Amino acid sequence: MLVVLPENILLSVAALLALSTTTAVAELKYSNDTGGSVKLYGQFNPAYLSFDDGVASYGDLVDNEVSNSRVGIEVKQEFGSSVLIFDFLTGMGFGQSSNYSQTGDPDFFNWDRTFVRELQLSLKTENAGTFTFGQGSMTTDGVAQSDLSGTKVAMYNGLDTVAGNYEFRTAAGALSGVEIDDTFTSFDSSRRGRIRYDSPSLNNFTFSAAYGTNILTPNNDDIFADAAVRYKNEIAGTKIIGSLGFSRRTRNGVDRDDTFGSISGLHPSGFNLTLAAGSRKDSGSYSFAKVGYIADWLSVGKTSMAVDFYNGSDFVTDGSSSKSVGFGVVQKFDAANLETYLVVRSYEYADSTNSYLDASSVLFGSRWKF
C-alpha cells in the first residue's frame, strides 16, 4: 500500500536540510580538579508521521518515541578507583508518536512525571561492578534491540513506538479496536523505580539483575524483576553485540513472564544482520530480522539503509498472526550531530474472527543531539 506524502512534509524536508548545515554545539560540560564533572545533554527528535489504514490517511507532527526528545544532567565524582554518578533525564513532554490515532491525538505539549526517564544514583567500581538505585532502566530494557545497522534512531525492533495507537480496520471499513501495539511488540522492558546491579565485563559478557516498581504511575502495585546477559566483541574485524533476558511482572499475585533476546553483527564492508525473538508465556511470540548496509557515500557522514521483517503470532487471540515489512534510510551529518531518516512500513494482521485491511506508515524526521 502506498502512502501519499502531504505537501507540508516537503516543508519539513527543507527545514531538516537547513538544520544539517548548522555547526555542532560544544559539549556543555564543566570539570573540576578532583575528577568531578557536571554535564548538560539531550536531544530533539521531531518527525512527521503519516498513517494509512486502508480507508483514510492521517498525518501529524510528532515526537519520535523510538528515541524521544529529552534533556538531562549528569554529575560525576571520582573516589579513588570508583565513580559516583547522579543522573536526571526527562522526556520533554511533546506528543509521542505512539499516542496518535484515528480517534484522537495527544496534546502537542503536556509534560507530566511519567516522562522522567532517569532519576538515579550509581556507584561504578573497578572490580565489583555497578550498583544503581532510583528511576531508570530495568536490566532487560534494550535486550530485544541489539542493533548495529545505524538505523535504530527510527527503525528498530519496537514497532509499537511509532504508530502504536492506530487501529486496524475490518474488511468492512470499521475500526476494529485491535491496535498496532496489541499485535507488534518486542517484550522489551521499560524504566522503573528499582535497585540494579551490573557486573564487570567477564570474557566479553556482562550480567545484570534488577527489582522494582512503577513509582511514576499512581495506584500501581505491579512488581518487576528481571535479569539479563549481554555480549560485546569484535572478531576478525566484525563487530558483534547480543543480549538475552528474562522479565517477570507480578500483578495481583499473577505472574507474566517474558523471555527474549537479540544479536547483531556488523562486517567491515558495511553489511550487517540483526536477529531477535521473544516469547510471553501462554500469550504470543515473535521473530524479527533486519538486513542493512552502511555506506560512506557522502563526506557529511555515513548513510545507513535497512529492510526488516517482523512475524508475530497469538498476541490478541490464539491463532492470530502479525506481519510487518519496513524499509529505512538514515543519513548522518557529523558536524551538526544530526541524523535525518525516512522509514516506510507495512502492517498485516489476521485472526479467525474477522478480516482486516492492511495498513502502512511513513516516518520522516531528524534527531539532533547536544
Image (spheres, grey):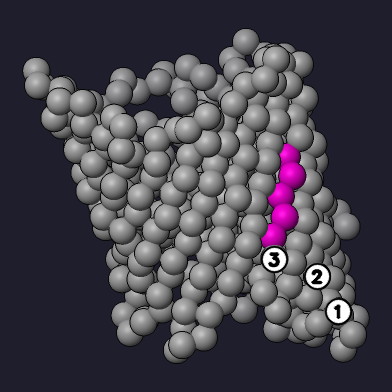
Q: Earlier in the sequence, mark 1 or mark 2?
A: 2
Q: CA distance from mark 3 to mark 2?
A: 10 Å
The residue identified by callout 1 is 319
The residue identified by callout 2 is 313
Q: Earlier in the sequence, mark 3 or mark 2?
A: 3
Q: Quadrant of residue 280?
A: bottom right
Give the label, 3 or 1, closer to the camera.
Answer: 3
- Numbered disc 3: secondary structure: strand
Instruction: Spot the residue most to the left.
Output: 33
Say the numbered circle drawn on residue 231.
Answer: none
Instruction: Estimate the x, y position of residue 208 in percent, counting from the top left.
Output: 44, 49
The answer to if 275 sits in the magenta stretch is yes
The residue identified by callout 3 is 279
Q: Residue at x 56, y 61 (%)?
A: 246
Report the quarter where the C terminus lies: top left
- Can residue 342 be seen by looking at this rendering? no
Disc 1 and disc 2 in contact, CB within 8 angstroms: yes
Q: Which residues are magenta?
A: 274-278
The dominant secondary structure in magenta is strand
Neighbour tally class for label 1: few under 14, some 14-19, many 20 plus, Cα within 10 Å: few
Q: Which amino acid type is marked by label 3?
A: Ser
Residue 116 relative to residue 369: left or right:
left
Q: Which amino acid type is marked by label 2?
A: Ser
